[in-house]
Image (cartoon, rainbow, N blue to C red):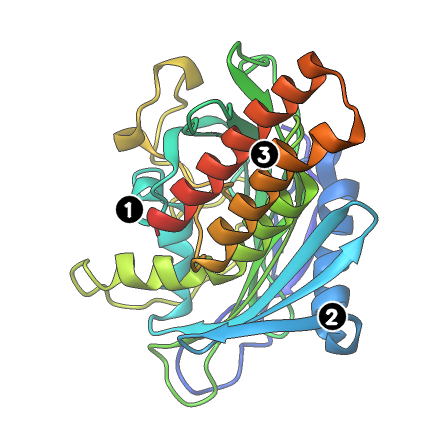
């Protein structure tokens, strides 16, 4: 496969600085520009905290948001008590997705493009009358010159996973993890997580914003899941040469047909749609909106048929929010 080569340094997970020995990484020429752009965008935006609005902090994870038209971007800063190699392997492991995402209905590896790049498929569960969402994501990781590992995903298309009946094809604009070796603890990683996605369909904007904002705390779920696993020895993560050996969960798994995938075959996709951290504030707000639709709109002289449609949509949205809050 044709590949565009660039260079980066190894990651040494001890307390010593990264090696100056650089290695090229694989990246498909067809996707090089968009992946490089996604990485640059994520790194630039996450480095400028003044452009973000602080939202809340939970279990040491700080959540920020930034409006971008009708969509919301979220940023999270925190840490995971595992070495960078362990975190990377876990996030790339095709069998782990369901362990930290209760919304996972189907996940699969669609195809591997090279040692650093894959196409993944993810579908979330439907909630009452709210259709499940599915994603086809181009996922790429590499080691940066400063020794950090960056992993990004963005929406793509693939003939193996066309849109499916009963699911709404959502779009990840950019999603990414930056995994930085801790300054003093080789068994801890500093984490930056960023996400911007469009759930599509008819989900109201305030619900979409809440779903996206809740993703800022996804590293808490990842940490909880990783703590249940046996200890794993850390190792230096390096970029992969073209034609060289492949590790970091790179080429051991076969390609899986997304139609046959199950939650037990889960393949990592860099974002999910419905893992939540909500409190009772969101259901109460949704219930208030429902009452407004139910009793307020008739005073505006709205047509009965239109009123019925709006009421049922409000009920669906209220149930969706309640489900998301209770399944944390």
Q: Is residue 228 left or right of residue 204?
A: left
271 vs 280, nearest the viewer = 280
10 vs 41, nearest the viewer = 41
User: Badge 1 is on which residue?
Assistant: 99
Label 3: how many Cα within 10 Å (few below 14, some 14–19, many 20+): many
The residue depicted at 19 percent of the width and 58 percent of the height is 229
The answer to which image quadrant residue 208 occupies is: top right
Residue 9 pos. (x, y %):
59, 68
User: Badge 2 is on which residue?
Assistant: 52
The residue depicted at 49 percent of the width and 42 percent of the height is 272
Residue 47 pos. (x, y %):
72, 73
- The quadrant of the rendering that contains the N terminus is top right
Q: Nearer the viewer, mark 3 or mark 1?
A: 1
User: Badge 3 is on which residue?
Assistant: 137
Label 1: how many Cα within 10 Å (few below 14, some 14–19, many 20+): some
Q: Secondary structure at mark 3?
A: strand
Residue 178 pos. (x, y %):
56, 64
Q: Secondary structure at mark 2?
A: loop
The answer to which image quadrant residue 96 occupies is: top left
């Amino acid at each position: 496969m044709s590949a565009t080569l660039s260079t980066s340094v190894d990651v040494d997970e001890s307390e010593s600085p990264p090696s100056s020995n650089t290695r090229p990484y694989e990246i498909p020429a067809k996707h090089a520009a968009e992946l490089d752009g996604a990485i640059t965008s994520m790194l630039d935006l996450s480095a400028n905290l003044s452009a973000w609005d602080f939202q809340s902090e939970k279990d040491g994870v700080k959540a920020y948001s930034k409006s971008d038209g009708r969509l919301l971007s979220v940023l999270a800063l925190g840490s995971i008590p595992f070495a960078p190699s362990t975190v990377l392997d876990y996030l790339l492991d095709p069998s782990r997705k369901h362990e930290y995402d209760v919304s996972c209905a189907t996940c699969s590896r669609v195809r591997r493009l090279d040692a650093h790049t894959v196409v993944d498929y993810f579908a979330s569960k439907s909630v009452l009358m709210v259709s499940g969402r599915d994603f086809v994501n181009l996922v790429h990781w590499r080691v940066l010159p400063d020794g950090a590992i960056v992993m990004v995903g963005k929406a793509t298309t693939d003939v193996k996973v066309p849109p499916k009946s009963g699911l709404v094809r959502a779009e990840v604009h950019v999603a990414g993890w930056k995994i930085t070796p801790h300054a003093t603890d080789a068994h801890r990683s500093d984490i930056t997580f960023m996400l911007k996605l469009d759930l599509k369909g008819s989900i109201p904007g305030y619900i979409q914003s809440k779903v996206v904002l809740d993703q800022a705390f996804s590293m808490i779920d990842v940490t909880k899941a990783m703590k249940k696993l046996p200890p794993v020895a850390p190792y230096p993560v390096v970029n992969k040469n073209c034609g060289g050996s492949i590790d970091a969960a790179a080429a051991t798994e076969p390609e899986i047909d997304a139609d046959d995938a199950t939650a037990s075959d889960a393949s990592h996709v860099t974002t999910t749609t419905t893992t939540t951290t909500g409190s009772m504030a969101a259901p109460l707000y949704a219930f208030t909106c429902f009452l407004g639709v139910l009793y307020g709109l008739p005073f505006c002289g709205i047509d009965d048929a239109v009123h019925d449609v709006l009421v049922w949509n409000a009920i669906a949205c209220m149930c969706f929010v309640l489900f998301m809050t209770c399944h944390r």
